[in-house]
Amino acid sequence: MGYDLSKEEIKEKILGKLKRNFGKTLEEATQDQIYKSCALSIRDVIVEKWTDANKQMLNQGLKRLYYLSAEFLMGRALVNNMINLHLLKDYQEVLTDLGLNLENIEEQERDAGLGNGGLGRLAACFLDSLSTLDFPVTGCSIRYEFGLFKQRILDGEQVEVDDNWLEAGNVWEIARPEEQVEVKYGGELEEVWTERGLKINHKNYYSVLAIPYDYPVMGYMSEMPATLRLWSARAKTELDMHYFNRGDYSKAMQERELAEVISKVLYPEDNHEQGRQLRLKQFYFFTSATMQHIVRKHKANYGDLHTLPNYFTVQINDTHPTLAIPELMRILMDEEGMGWDEAFDICSRIFNYTNHTIMAEALERWEEDMFKALLPRIYEIIKVINDKFCDSLWKIYPGEWDKISKMAIISYHEIRMANLCIAVCNKVNGVSKLHGEIIKSRTFRDFYIVFPDKFLGITNGITPRRWLAKANQPLTKLLCDHIGDGFLKDYKEMDRIEDLLDNQKFLDDFMEVKHQNKIHLRDHLKKTQGIEINENTIFDVHAKRLHEYKRQLLKVLHILHLYNLKKENPQVHIEPCTFLFAAKASPGYVRAKNIIRLILAVADLVNNDPDTKDILRVVFIENYSVSEAEILIPATDISEQISTAGLEASGTGNMKFMMNGAVTLGTMDGANVEIYEAVGDDNIFIFGATEQEISRMERFGTYKPGLYYEQNTDLRLALNRLIDGSLHVANDRQFSDLYHSLLFGEMQRADQYYLLYDFASYTQAYEQIVSAYVDKERWKRMAAMNTAKSGRFSSDRTINEYNELIWHLRKMSERK
Ligand code: RUG
């Protein structure tokens, strides 16, 4: 059942929007205007549902989740919304009747790229699932004017181009200037006595306005569209007339520029924190605005702030939004006159924290003096939380200074945000079973001993609407033909695909869909990058952010090894394979950018050598984004998930690939472990050191990469290619840094990510997966099995678990 809209009405709506919003007929309109008219017609439908649902929700006094995240990697909305409203087919038909093509129209929409990778995309999947399950939610973040940079490859390296995604306007957002709030920075504190006791006065501060923009996010056949609220920074006065009148125009604009820079650009950091003041300003900006909004709303609807935890629950997605905690304390105490204990009790019931990494460089810390100068009152509050927390630890561990200092929130002139979260929040969760265990047994072990009931592991998930129904329409159609479309709302229905694994026709059709998707990717790469690939080869894909722990470099060494095999013996049979890489590197991450150079140099070598060019093809796909992933993932045969065990908290790409019938070649890391459990040993290829093995080597310092180099000739020859002049380089020493980092190390230990250790077992696992691939009967069953078992990786399952264990929200449809 779709939304009740006839095709005639759809047509009228589109043409009506064109006429009223742009003063154009269909013949006169540009593609952009047609896109906007379609989008506005869809938006009307959603906004109507949204307004009704929000009213209902208030009438029923339902609790609402606020999901705070510095990133929401939404991608495009148009077709996804059509699917979720069950209107895609009708729109397609109407557009065809009008002589239009939905694919071309869709391309007018800019990706909302407000995220770096997995963390931001998870937040986007969660909004889709929360709405699909009819749970009330508002996601809150920053309306970055520039999303994650666009990546271009020029002269063999990554070049960053700004992503001015709002340039042509954004039809989905609704500005709500009437709900603006003021966010204050800097200044000094003063204690004053009033009739109600001691009061903290914040003076000489400077402030900016936070203006909210709301986006309705439509879940699948939902009664409760989610809200994504993005805050935009604006100066209180646009122009300083004092300077303007004196002719000092740049000074007159200064305040505006200083304010607006706060929501200007998303930091391109993934699994890395730099402690920059502007980033701290950004985090305080959106968390303060959100907390002010929640308090204001609660007072207007329910009056008594003591009941706040009955109506709101807040999830802190990674530590970036942690400042919401002291900010709510500040509002409750300084503005609402509550005492410390009451305010703290409310916070400890409202807030929950999700940890997404154990890597030291990604655990957020702020330099104490900088923090204090920028946010003096927030600093004071954190200091008191810290003092009280350390006092309580002292009672448990009298005299154990070392332990207490490790657990403290402020220590060695740094403020540690994860410690603050754990000290205050009601629940703390990891993002896969393995990661949930690691944070309990290692990263936050001391905290776990004190608060065993706080810690949980909830495995991430992905929405099958975006990653199947939208990204892979042919596969979705095939599945619908066999098991109906119930699986899009109820992930458990996907288990029924397993019954089809003995149906030869289904398996053949499944492989035909894959083949068509490979052709689609081939055509796309030809059109966008002028690259030729052969769809009759294996598509082996490594697509995710560029990071040393994700080990793109291991894959490159393996390709060099295959290249060496062919050069050494031209008769040797190597199964033709296209190796596709897609990865953005943080602009300041020098080694990551060098790995991109290396991939491109290896591509240049093997793609142009007459001995290998028809067998091995290496391709770097520019500008990996949600929209690129939607084309790449459905076309993939082998999904490379080869991170160093213990370092990828979960991964979600691994789930997207499996859902689309790719077979995983991976380590026992993050959610790969659960994919292994789900599909069974026969349908996945696992290699490499386990997390325990690595942990042991780390503890005893026993790993000596040089030994592997000496003993494994294949590895040595592959590695030598980096420095022996085989590769085209801008300067002679281009790749010697990578070579040295693996063999000798500099500041860090050599081969910190255990590439050389895992090389031999990777090579072996690759051979096994390729022999499975060439056995067509075996492979098709394997590929389909991966799709069949992907139901548990639906973010609907994840959200149900969060709800049962943490949020306790009631659904709209359960209304009494
Ligand atoms: O690296 C992690 C992924 O393993 C995980 O799947 C994803 C979502 O939970 O979050 C990623 N992540 C972690 N991104 N940034 C961080 C640390 O700031």
Image (cartoon, grey):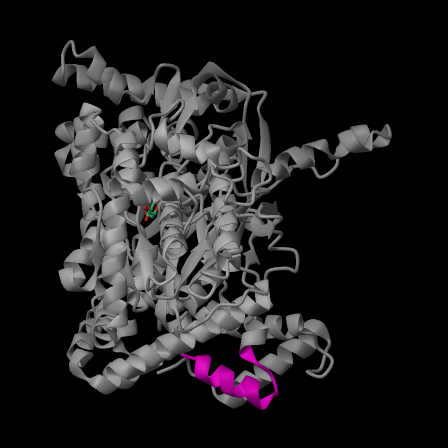
- Magenta-tinted stretch: 85-102
Image coordinates for residue 507, horizontal then vertical, percent: 25, 80
Quadrant in the picture for the N terminus: bottom left
Question: Along the line of sight, which residue is nearer the eye, 105 or 564?
Answer: 564
Does residue 68 appear in this view? no
Q: Quadrant where the C terminus lies?
A: bottom left
Residue at 55% across / 20% down in the picture?
Answer: 187
Q: Is residue 687 magenta?
A: no
- 232 relative to 775 in the view: left or right: right
Q: Position of residue 775 (x, y in %)?
A: 23, 73
Q: Pinpoint residue 113: horizontal percent, then vertical percent.
A: 51, 53
Q: How many marks?
A: 0
**Is 28 in front, or is 378?**
28
Q: Is residue 776 left or right of residue 382?
A: left
Image quarter for residue 296? top left
Is residue 99 rendered magenta in the image? yes
Q: Quadrant of residue 400?
A: top left
Q: Is residue 313 above or below residue 359?
A: below
Horizontal relation, residue 146 to residue 352: left or right: right
717 up-or-down from 172: above or below = above
